[in-house]
Image: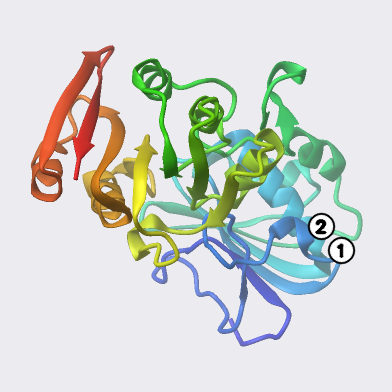
Amino acid sequence: MTDTTSAAVYGFPPREVIETPRGAIQTAPTVPGAEPLEGLADASLDAFVALAPAGAVERRYVLAQMLRALKPGGRLTVAAPKDRGGLRLKKELEAFGCKIGEDARRHHRICITLRPEAPAGLTEALAEGAPRRIDGEGLWTQPGVFSWDRLDTGTALLMSALPAFSGAGADLGCGIGVLAHQVLASPKVTKLALIDIDRRALDAARRNVGDDRVSFSHADVRLGLPELSGLDFVVSNPPFHEGGGEDKALGQAFIRGAAALLKKGGALWLVANRHLPYEAVLGEHFTRVRPVIDQNGFKVFEAVK
């Protein structure tokens, strides 16, 4: 594809699957600093390239946003792994009134289409994938965010074990702010930094956690958090999947990141799936590691620096 000043990309399509135009605007919510997809003007782009998300509701929402942002006749090129939505891409785009050219490459299905003059069903898809409140009255969330429609087992277990904290702390991978409510229940907590790589989760957390002690950061923990140091505590339910596959290095990076943020004597409270090998890296970076709970396939640790 030739360069264009009005092109955008969602995520990181493999180069061997789709060519991304140089200078394309990044719009994925899991890329800190990216342009919000929802903020793109209607009918403003000539081309959009995307690696489609795996979740059906999230994927239709993203497809609808991209079609909304494209000019009539603008070119949309979307790929997805065959086992993560690729086999449904063509039918989903056809439901928007698109005529599809389809290809397959490197275990991905690729759909190419030109944006119709008046795509069908955009309003419904955008509404279905938009931010909402759990059960209509609970916390704000959005399809695509981790455990977006329920409290996950690991977070619930960690919540059952947390002590009453004091001082300044951080929640690495804060999600929509569930842990923050419990941490902030202690009046001795002076500051709490909520950090997540998913802008949608952080936007929800801003709506869910109204407290002057809280700051928010859209950041990748693996790249370091130089603005934070000398913390009294860190809580975390770190991710362990990326790109559809398990990646134990993610949680290990969160552990190293937490250690860098804590002062001597500060504590990390961490929950992880039982099978994940975190004990060694905890031992390398903390002076004392205490298993607190081991049940329901998860384990909770307290690690003191």
Q: Amino acid at mark 2?
A: Arg
Residue at the spot 57% in from the left edge and 39% down from the top edge: 144
Disc number at residue 42? 1
N-terminal of the pair, mark 1 or mark 2, is: 1
**Disc 2 target residue:** 68
Q: Nearer the viewer, residue 103 or 212?
A: 212
Quadrant of the rendering where the C terminus is positioned: top left
- x then y, percent, for residue 262: 30, 51
Task: Name the quadrant containing residue 123.
Answer: top right
Asked which secondary structure carries label 2, the reply is helix
- x then y, percent, for residue 153: 40, 18
Which residue is most to the front?
Answer: 188
- x then y, percent, for residue 220: 43, 58
Disc number at residue 5? none
Residue at the spot 25% in from the left edge and 51% down from the top edge: 259
Q: Compared to 239, does 273 lie above or below?
A: above
Q: Are marks 1 and 2 in contact (CB under 8 Å)?
A: yes
Which residue is most to the right?
Answer: 118
158 relative to 38 in the view: left or right: left
- x then y, percent, for residue 208: 67, 34
